[in-house]
Image: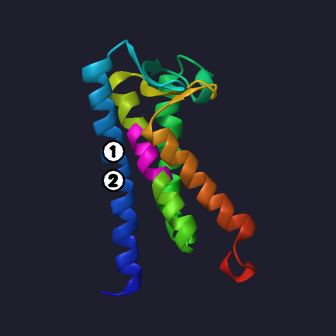
């Protein structure tokens, strides 16, 4: 099997692993913490939140808009994924894809996104999908700004 096929399989597995981890974590939160909270550490709680907007609760009650816009951007990422040829940016892209799939699933299934990671020093509650999207965007940004000139 050539390197490109192996990389494609690994990256697809990464996206699916993010989606699976997101679904599992949200299912556990819904089952055990529905509309409640549990302090884990002095600065960290698991806190069930229904988010109909985007980051930091902005643009609330625009779920249908986000279903369509997120799906549109996900399709664009899938269409242009071959442009992300460097390992870091390709892994980052697939983290974003897996996270986007997780949040789109929530919006379609529930009409909102389930958030639950609540750090007292951070202004928003978030989930596994959000963390993967953020980490993926950081990896892509790192490659763009700090990658070798020939790698871009």
Q: Could you say which quadrant of the image residue 123 lies in?
A: top right
Q: Could you say which quadrant of the image residue 138 lies in?
A: bottom right
Image x and y of residue 29, in percent: 32, 26
Instruction: Give the secondary structure at mark 1.
Output: helix
Please indicate whether residue 138 sits to the left or right of residue 100 in the image: right
The structure residue drawn at horizontal position 46% and vertical position 33%, both measured from the top left corner, is 67
The residue closer to the viewer here, 84 or 118, is 118
The answer to whether residue 117 is above or below residue 23 is above
Image x and y of residue 143, in percent: 66, 67
Image x and y of residue 87, in percent: 53, 72
The residue closer to the viewer here, 59 or 124, is 124
- Principal secondary structure, stretch drawn in magenta: helix
Is residue 152 found inside the magenta-colored segment of the image? no
The answer to whether residue 4 is above or below residue 66 is below
Total residue callouts: 2
Residue to which mark 1 is pinned? 21
The quadrant of the rendering that contains the C terminus is: bottom right
The answer to whether residue 38 is above or below residue 18 is above
The structure residue drawn at horizontal position 53% and vertical position 63%, both measured from the top left corner, is 80
Magenta stretch bounds: 96-102
Residue to which mark 2 is pinned? 17
The quadrant of the rendering that contains the N terminus is: bottom left
Mark 1: few, some, or many residues within 10 Å (few <14, many ≥20)? some
């Amino acid at each position: 099997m050539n390197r490109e096929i192996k990389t494609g399989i690994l990256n697809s597995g990464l996206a699916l692993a993010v989606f699976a981890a997101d679904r599992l974590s949200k299912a556990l939160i819904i089952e055990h913490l529905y509309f409640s909270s549990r302090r884990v550490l002095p600065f960290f709680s698991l806190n069930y939140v229904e988010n109909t907007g985007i980051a930091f609760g902005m643009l609330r009650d625009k779920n249908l808009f986000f279903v369509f816009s997120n799906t549109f951007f996900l399709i664009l990422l899938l269409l242009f994924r071959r442009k992300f040829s460097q390992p870091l940016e390709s892994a980052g892209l697939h983290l974003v894809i897996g996270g986007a799939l997780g949040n789109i699933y929530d919006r379609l299934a529930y009409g909102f996104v389930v958030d639950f990671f609540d750090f007292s020093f951070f202004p928003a509650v978030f989930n596994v999908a959000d963390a993967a999207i953020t980490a993926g965007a950081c990896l892509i940004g790192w490659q763009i700004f700090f990658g070798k000139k020939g790698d871009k």
